[in-house]
Image (spheres, grey):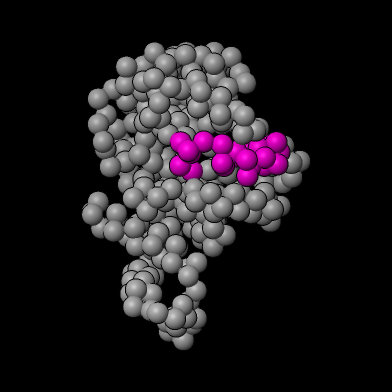
């Protein structure tokens, strides 16, 4: 991901594929990303109905400030294959897809091969939510130049690992995905917090995700968006510090820069550039 492509991916709001009436409202929710879900949110007998309702939403969408995408069914399922065929037949396909349950880099490369022509510009956002996906996360993260982010799917992951769905039991799994996303300079979003009445719990988990290295968090209701955006936005203090660090490096000739009594080494520059890119994007969007 180049500096020019850095953008806030703090929050993602899911919209059920059978409820296209919620799409416009979701775009006004303040979420950085809106994802229409035709996978987990749709029962098997209604998958075709969801496709018919969802894909027309993206015709004439233009370049909205909000990123939009569709979570499609896994390529290893009949409905995943039908999703691909429907996408290839779209005059105006979605700008991005959320790829569910990949087990290997080969699956990502297959998406890449199948989605050419009118679909060649579709970006990928990949959910790591199985033991196979976790084992192969490094190769998956590097499988296509079209990947913009990874997502951590705790519900399916905990079931696959035979572990309780708690922060402590899934710390190892989260950390592996953080490592892969950081290594390949991808954004990384955490699983939604499912208790809509526990805003304090949402904030607490979001802050732990932020501290671990996630760049954002998914959500299932618009009322969760303000908390998530606040947690994953750079503070004014951090933005000011980033500007001072970069200014010091610009005039440095020794390779040793000290800011506020702390020795700052060159690898910090990358993260400071990211902070400023996101801050500038948010300021311009406002």
Query: Residue 52 or 260: which is nearer the viewer?
Result: 260
Residue 14 is left or right of residue 153, and the answer is: left
Q: Residue at position x 59%, y 14% from top?
A: 78
Q: Using the rendered view, name the quadrant where residue 95 is placed.
A: top left
Instruction: Farthest residue to the right: give it.
Output: 162
- Residue 8 position, x and y percent, is 37, 51
- Residue 192 position, x and y percent, is 52, 44
Q: Indicate whether residue 138 is drawn in magenta.
A: yes
Which region is colored magenta?
A: 128-149
Residue 233 visible in rendering: yes
Residue 56 is left or right of residue 60, and the answer is: right
Q: Using the rendered view, name the quadrant where residue 108 is placed.
A: top right
**Looking at the figure, which quarter contains the C terminus?**
bottom left
Q: Residue at position x 60%, y 53% from top?
A: 179
Q: Residue at position x 38%, y 29% from top?
A: 121
- Residue 54 position, x and y percent, is 39, 22
Query: Residue 66 or 202: which is nearer the viewer?
Result: 66
Q: Is residue 11 above or below residue 168?
A: above
Query: Residue 232 or 146: which is nearer the viewer?
Result: 146
Instruction: Farthest residue to the bottom: give it.
Output: 261
- Residue 184 position, x and y percent, is 53, 49
């Amino acid at each position: 991901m180049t500096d020019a492509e850095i953008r806030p991916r703090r929050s993602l709001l899911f919209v059920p594929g059978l409820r296209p009436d919620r799409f416009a409202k979701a775009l006004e929710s303040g979420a950085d990303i809106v994802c229409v879900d035709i996978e987990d949110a749709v029962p098997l007998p209604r998958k075709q109905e969801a496709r018919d309702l969802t894909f027309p939403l993206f015709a004439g969408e233009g370049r909205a400030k909000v990123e939009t995408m569709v979570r499609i069914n896994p390529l290893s399922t009949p409905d995943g294959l039908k999703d691909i065929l429907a996408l290839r037949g779209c005059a105006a396909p979605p700008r991005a897809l959320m790829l569910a349950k990949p087990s290997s880099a080969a699956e990502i490369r297959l998406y890449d091969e199948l989605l050419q022509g009118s679909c060649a510009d579709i970006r990928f956002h990949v959910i790591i939510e199985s033991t196979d996906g976790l084992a192969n996360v490094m190769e998956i993260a590097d499988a296509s130049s079209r990947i913009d982010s990874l997502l951590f799917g705790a519900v399916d992951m905990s079931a696959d690992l035979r572990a309780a769905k708690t922060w402590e039991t899934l710390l190892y799994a989260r950390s592996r995905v953080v490592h892969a996303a950081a290594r390949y300079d991808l954004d990384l979003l955490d699983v939604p917090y499912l208790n809509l009445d526990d805003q304090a719990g949402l904030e607490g988990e979001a802050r732990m995700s932020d501290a671990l290295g996630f760049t954002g968090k998914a959500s299932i209701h618009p009322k969760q968006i303000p908390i998530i955006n606040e947690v994953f936005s750079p503070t004014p203090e951090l933005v000011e510090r980033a500007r001072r660090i970069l200014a010091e490096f610009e005039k440095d000739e020794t390779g040793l820069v000290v800011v506020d009594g702390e020795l700052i080494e060159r690898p910090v520059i990358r993260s400071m550039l990211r902070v400023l890119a996101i801050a500038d994007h948010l300021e311009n969007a406002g």
